[in-house]
Amino acid sequence: MASHPYSRLPDYANWRRAVSRVAPGELDPMVEAPFRFDAGARVVTAGSCFAQHIGRFLKAKGCCYLVTEPAHAIVGPKARDVLNYGLYSARYGNIYTSRQLLQLFERAYGRFVPGEDVWREDQTVFLDPFRPNIQPLGFNSLREYEIDRARHFQAVRDAFENLDVFVFTLGLTECWRSRADGAVFPVCPGVVGGTFSPERHEFVNLTVEDVVSDMSAFIGGLRGVNPGARIILTVSPVPLVATAEPRHVLVSTVYSKSVLRVACERLVQSFEGVAYFPSYEIIAGGFASKNYFAEDKRSVTQEGVDHVMAVFERHFIEDSPEQAAMRLALQLLNAQTDSSPLQNVSKAMKLMCDEEALDFDSSKDDVRRKND
């Protein structure tokens, strides 16, 4: 038999051995991570709704999940959930796009000040345009908002400067921005706050070049304040709730995820210490022998999350004695409670998914208007 480059392929490079003959729930498209971290590494997470799973998992596994913006002392446990403390390392809410992430970094370090930096709903309700859901009822005064924003930016700087590993989940390419200065919002103005104006706001759909440029600038900025920072990029498998493009939402979803995936590949090839984790491929690829989407064909089931995080743990987390001891302690703690840190995740995700507000029943809205 003639010898050729395909004669001695490793198992992971052969579809039959790596995909079609793999037992359900065992698909692992990760070959070798460029780095690993142990329980002592300070990890910060950010990104779209799906990124919330990663933070919860790291905490449940006893990793050093860095939280630089804890709840105020006067805020009770229930209020912490309502005010969205602890979802991420700092209270920045969901960061869906590369442009949002770069913008957060630049604002935290005083390099960019948006013109539209507060939404005044009435005399005593002020919303943060870039974190509209972190305080659903808004701030009671402009002064309260400004104090909280300054505290938030300090927490963001603390996170960036002290992290060892940054895990970022890219979710969307579609976004809305200010025509005046290019500031981007997590959700279209007018959906959960503010007032939409075609004269002041415009739709933009980021390209591969846009995402690569944004992320390259962010990585450069991050390593300017934290030279040893390592980065794990992943793409959210959650489809778009709605699209502003004049086409089917499924087509827009495939476009967005394709752009993000290609951009991640270019970034990994361009930067040392930047890894890609294939959560998108495991869930949305349709090759795991199981359907990991719920009935809405959008929400990821707990079984899917467990599969993704098992692969993440296998390749990125060092199994040190400290890690094993923490895992045992957490298992004992969870056994005494009604639910583990990884349960009820879909409920928590819906609580803090700004994008969900784009999905409404127009027939019910028509009835509401007639009754007003």
Image (tube, grey):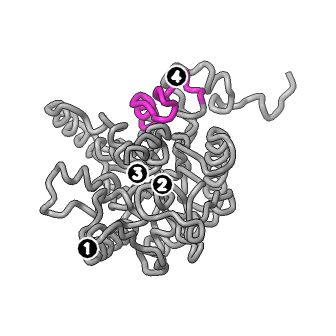
Which mark identifies residue 130?
Answer: none
Q: What residue is disc 1 on?
A: 141
Which of the two labelled residues, at mark 2 and mark 4, occupies the earlier sequence position?
2
User: Is 177 situated left or right of 110 in this image?
Assistant: right
Q: Position of residue 258 (x, y in %)?
A: 66, 46
Q: What residue is disc 3 on?
A: 37
Label total for image? 4
Q: Are marks 2 and 4 in contact (CB under 8 Å)?
A: no
The residue depicted at 56 percent of the width and 21 percent of the height is 22
SS type, badge 2: strand
Q: Are marks 3 and 2 in contact (CB under 8 Å)?
A: no
Is residue 211 within the magenta segment? Answer: no
Dominant SS of magenta comes to loop
Mark 2: few, some, or many residues within 10 Å (few <14, many ≥20)?
A: many
Q: What residue is disc 4 on?
A: 290
Q: Position of residue 288 (x, y in %)?
A: 55, 26
Residue type of the residue flagged with mark 4: Lys
SS type, badge 4: loop
Q: Position of residue 31 (x, y in %)?
A: 57, 39
The residue depicted at 60 percent of the width and 47 percent of the height is 243
Q: Nearer the viewer, mark 1 or mark 4?
A: 1
Q: Are marks 1 and 2 in contact (CB under 8 Å)?
A: no
Q: What residue is disc 2 on?
A: 168
